[in-house]
Amino acid sequence: MQYKWIALTNTTICILMASLDANILIIALPRLVPDLHVSLIETIWIILSYGLVTSSVLLSFGRLADMFGRVKLYNFGLILFTIASFLCSLAQTGTELILFRILQAFGAAFLFSNSAAILTDAFDEKERGKALGLNQISIVIGSALGLVLGGILTEMLGWRAIFWVNIPIGIFAIVWSKAKLRELGTIVKGKIDWIGNLVLVVGLVMVMLGITFGSLQVIPSFAAMFLLAGGFCMLLLFGYVESKVKEPMFDLSLFKLRFFSAGNITIFLNALARGALVLIMAFYLQGPSMRLNPFTAGLYLIPVSFTIATFGPISGWLSDRYGSRFLTILGLLVSAIGFLMLSQIGPVTSFNDLVLPLSLVGAGMGLFASPNRSSIMNSVPPQRRGVAAGMSTTLVTLGNIISLGVSFALLASTVPLYELESIFLGSSSTLNAGAAIPSFIKSIHLIFYISTFVLIASIIPAIVQRSQKERVIY
């Protein structure tokens, strides 16, 4: 096997594993929460901590890789992720699980940041966009596959089994990577943008604390507004710092490229629209009206995984032949129709009724992912593609966690707090169904309506992208 295919296969398996863990836990929460006796706020941060940490440090870890070796830090991330997965399976409290998830997220950040750089080194210019596109598809497939696999493992072996699955895969990938991956990149001296990273982390944490603590009334409303305002100010300061620092972690100059900007705005809005899908569907299917077990809930969500896995590779092949713009727009439109159909679901629905909307959402994701990623990578000079890939992945993870945070806030604004706690803490069987279910379904409708609107809005920047055939490769 040629080295480039070894690099693509190894990194794709590992990215699939890291992406899978972003969602695999959600389907198991209705079983995990009562078992560990965690609070509602702990439940939320078990979900948010993984994506928040990954998006906060991903770019800085990529910079470290340039300075100390991409394969070396990629292998370190693999080891860290595998050990952290084992520790997660041993957690006895919600706090322990949050801490181990944070450790797991650090490992995932090393994988996300270095996989793109390793592929950039392994593939020549003509094939690099395709390879990075396939790697991007694995993120989407992993997120969707986590639903099904998480449901099966939770029902058959218990929620701890969702972390066991990473251990054999991780060990195999570590051995294979140590044996086969080579350091092709040039080690360069440089500095870490610690100020920018600190400002970004503080800003993101303040925003997410403001959203979650405020919506759940953990802190007074004025304190929540202070956190939100302070967080947004820190994010604005992050943009200023990155425009002034000599070696920025987030290269804002790339946004001067029209098609790079359009592609990244589109991918961020897409992540913002679909980021909460897993959470909402998991608690809808296992909530007070449907009451499915994790295994059956996972089966209900197979259409999403199947259509992403089917349409993703087909879309990548078509975009290489006919260009990316049409497929990108088509994917967004198809997903929007799927979300609009989901916004009409009632308290109880059948598998047959969900097949079409979930298939449309998954097909749209599959059609969108590879063409959009290729258009981003082909819009920048070859020597900047590693940085561009890291920035794009960061925007995806940011969109996902913001989507989750906003969805929690919308749920809390629609569903009375005591009912929301009962649903999320697994005690919805004690609720007065007549009081809890209507408000819960109303909140789901609101979230999916907003997702539909955001997806339609994301078509606007996608329209400005020319097809790959028409674009000048720098």
Image (cartoon, helix red, strand yellow):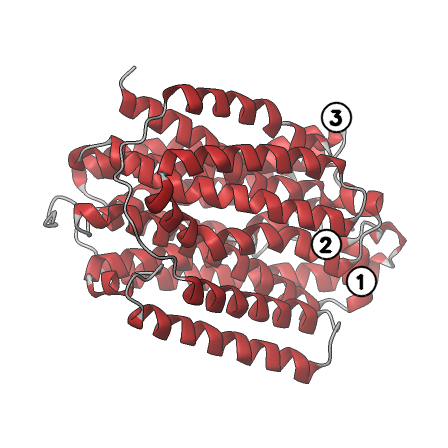
Counting the numbered discs, the total is 3
Disc 2 to disc 3, how far (Cα)? Answer: 22 Å
Amino acid at pointer 2 = Thr
Which residue bears the numbered disc 1? 419
Q: Position of residue 302 (x, y in %)?
A: 56, 33
The residue drawn where x is 38% and y is 25% is 9
State the mark number for residue 43.
2
In contact (CB < 8 Å): disc 2 and disc 3: no
The image quarter containing residue 65 is: top left
The 10 Å Cα crowd at callout 3, few under 14, some 14 to 19, many 20 or more, is few
Label 2's element?
A: helix
Which residue bears the numbered disc 3? 156
Q: Position of residue 253 (x, y in %)?
A: 24, 64
In contact (CB < 8 Å): disc 1 and disc 3: no
Q: Position of residue 312 (x, y in %)?
A: 37, 35
Disc 1 to disc 2, how far (Cα)? Answer: 15 Å
Of tags 1 and 3, the one toward the viewer is 3
The residue drawn where x is 20% and y is 52% is 380
Ranked by sequence position, the earlier of labels 1 and 2 is 2
Quadrant of the image containing the N terminus: top left
Label 1's element?
A: helix
Amino acid at pointer 1 = Glu
Residue 368 visible (yes or no): no
Q: Is residue 20 left or right of residue 428?
A: left
